[in-house]
Amino acid sequence: MYPHNAWFNPEGVDCATARSLLFTNRSFAHYTVAALVEYILITSNGPAQIALSNLLEARPTLRSSIRSLYINAHGAVAAQILSAAPRLGFLELAFHNEKIAEVRRVFSSIVQSRRSIRHLVVTSSFSDQAMRFDTPKKANNLSRIGEQLLDDCDALTTLRWNIPSVTFTMPANQDVLTCLEDISTSRYCYHFIQWATTSKLPLLKKFSLSAKAVGVYQYKDTNKSRSEGVTAFLKTHGPKLQEFFLDDFSVYDTDLLLCTRLVKLQIGLSANSSTVAKVKHPSVKYIIIHWSSTSFLAHLEKLLRGLYEGSYPALEQVVSTRSDFWPTTESALGSSQWQTEATQKLNARGVTLMDREGRVWRPRLEVKDVLRRSGRVADQRK
């Protein structure tokens, strides 16, 4: 969800060049220095990052030029840059092996920009074990990280939160994040889901849920407890949702009916995907299928057959995010592996099938149709 394709990564140039670029008004490619610091990646803690930090300290007027930050390496430089970005709109923080105290320092440095951030992504590879503390005091001191970060994010519209939340608490105030429209998380972030369930979130429209574990540690909690938390969330906010993404419907297929205004449904193709066809949702118009391996073609056929046999009365369009085997020419129509009876029946019912490039699927002509058409052409030539 990067907002720009012209990110500046100080690590990509040597230290001398970085200093020359950052401490003068010379342009980097066709970007001025002000534009150069508008989109910044911090992927290491090297000399170039320090030069960038020094630049922002020496030229305070540039701080307001920072609009987007992606930070994959945390330390004093990252914290300093964060604290010097009063008009930050997009922020992505990726944590890996940092100590929890370092996470807290990074979060606490986001002071000036909290009220301007509109898109926030926080991910980690922390394990459950890494989040445990040897004394209750340490746990208590660090358990308010989520609340500390989100409490003043009044302009936030998009939030991606993928941190196993064993030691995280969320804002106690139910009236925070009143502009939030789009939430993405994992069912293993159960404290986050519990908080979201009790929050008002009046503008919420989109919910994305990963059914997979975050980090390397396999949680001992049962799937039942995880699914109950998501069900509670959907009972509260489901009627608001217009778009829902879930990568595995094996647990949540029946909960889909709680989303009474749902228009767009995105699913990850798997052996369990066909269960979504049994839901018989009355308002879904668009179904987007995400898949990556050609070995999933059998699952795709099963899903399409289920969509035809099931009851999605409002269904208008099915989109596949993979274009392989997509028939785009007359010759491809005859050899495509996607020519199934269910696909043709969906097409005949008026459902448009497309790939992610917007190319429309066309049904293969049956042999008798080809003969009939060729005969008609022959008659016209006589």
Image: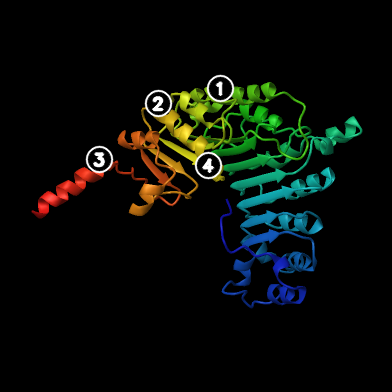
Q: Tell me which residue sits at (58%, 27%) in the image.
A: 250
- Name the residue beneath numbered marker 4: 290
Sort mark 2 into few (<14), some (14-19) or many (20+) by Cα contacts within 10 Å: some
Work out how far the residue at label 2 is from the one at label 4, CA to CA, in angstroms.
21 Å
Q: Amino acid at mark 2?
A: Glu
Q: Tell me which residue sits at (71%, 42%) in the image.
A: 149
313, 30: nearer the viewer: 313
Q: Tell me, yes or no, whether the two marked residues, 3 and 4, touch with CB atoms within 8 Å.
A: no
- List x then y, in percent, for residue 368: 25, 40
Work out how far the residue at label 3 is from the one at label 1, CA to CA, in angstroms.
51 Å
Sort mark 3 into few (<14), some (14-19) or many (20+) by Cα contacts within 10 Å: few
Q: How is the image coloured?
A: rainbow
Residue 90 drawn above or below residue 190: below
Q: Judging from the image, what secondary structure is the residue with disc 1 in?
A: helix
- Name the residue beneath numbered marker 1: 235
Q: Earlier in the sequence, mark 4 or mark 1?
A: 1
All told, the count of numbered labels is 4
- Name the residue beneath numbered marker 3: 368
Which circle marks residue 80 in the picture? none
Q: Judging from the image, what secondary structure is the residue with disc 4 in?
A: strand
Residue 53 drawn above or below residue 202: below
Q: Amino acid at mark 1?
A: Lys
- Name the residue beneath numbered marker 2: 309
Q: Earlier in the sequence, mark 3 or mark 4?
A: 4
Discs 2/4, front = 2
